[in-house]
Image (cartoon, helix red, strand yellow):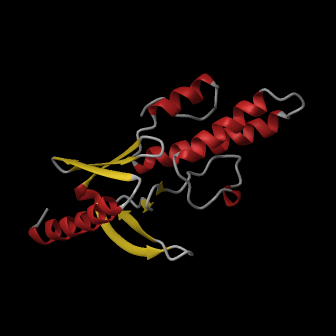
């Protein structure tokens, strides 16, 4: 990495660090260029290399609360709020992607998992409904993994529930 790019990446990192240090629900650690951000609400950890940073955009939501959009060289885009990190769910075959939220978070995995468990225990629920919920889970799970979250526990749960289309590797 040339000096100009190194300086740009360091500036981007400092923007992210300033935002996270002022947040209520996120914490940051760095080790030899590997960034780790912990999300307190569900103890999920996001990791990425500082050299992967492309752009940080300061934004405000509809309630005028600040958040940042972090763009990576890979094309991944993340939204950091005061307490959560948002990402795009992945597309899943047989799932109407337009019916999913544009941005999801790792706590959404627990919400969908609860819905799957309730659906599995409910008589009269169609297999189609259960398959849709499983595909939503896979979509969020894959998006989280692609974004850099450690979601190994959620993958194990999905395998126990026999949720289809989940990659076995982390």
Name the spot of residue 46 as percent of width and height, x first: 37, 47
Q: Is residue 17 above or below residue 149?
A: below
Q: Is residue 131 left or right of residue 66?
A: right
Instruction: Name the residue furthest left.
Output: 3
- Residue under the point 53% across and 51% down: 105
Q: How many marks?
A: 0
Q: Is residue 24 left or right of residue 33?
A: right
Among the 4 quarters of the image, the one containing residue 8? bottom left
Name the spot of residue 149 as percent of width and height, x first: 41, 44
Front-lying residue, 168 or 148 = 148
Front-lying residue, 114 or 69 = 114
Instruction: Name the residue furthest right.
Output: 124
- Residue under the point 21% across and 69% down: 11
Q: Quadrant of the N terminus?
A: bottom left
Among the 4 quarters of the image, the one containing residue 50? bottom left
Q: Is residue 150 left or right of residue 2?
A: right
Q: Quadrant of the C terminus?
A: top left
Name the spot of residue 45 as percent of width and height, x first: 38, 43
Q: Is residue 1 above or below residue 40?
A: below
- Residue under the point 59% across and 47% down: 108
Front-lying residue, 159 or 12 = 12
- Residue under the point 56% across and 34% down: 166
Name the spot of residue 76 as percent of width and height, x first: 42, 58
Q: Is residue 108 above or below residue 122?
A: below
């Amino acid at each position: 990495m040339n000096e100009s790019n190194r300086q740009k990446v360091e500036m981007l990192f400092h923007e992210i660090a300033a935002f996270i240090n002022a947040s209520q629900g996120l914490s940051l650690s760095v080790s030899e260029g590997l960034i780790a951000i912990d999300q307190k609400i569900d103890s999920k950890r996001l990791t990425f290399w500082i050299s992967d940073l492309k752009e940080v955009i300061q934004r405000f939501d509809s309630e005028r609360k600040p958040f940042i959009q972090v763009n990576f060289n890979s094309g991944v885009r993340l939204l950091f709020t005061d307490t959560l990190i948002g990402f795009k769910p992945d597309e899943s075959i047989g799932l109407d992607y337009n019916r999913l939220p544009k941005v999801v978070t790792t706590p959404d995995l627990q919400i969908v998992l609860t819905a799957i468990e309730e659906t599995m225990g409910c008589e009269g629920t169609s297999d189609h409904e259960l398959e849709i919920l499983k595909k939503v889970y896979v979509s969020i799970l894959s998006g989280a993994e692609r974004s850099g979250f450690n979601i190994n526990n959620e993958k194990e749960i999905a395998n126990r529930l026999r949720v289809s289309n989940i990659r076995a590797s982390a």
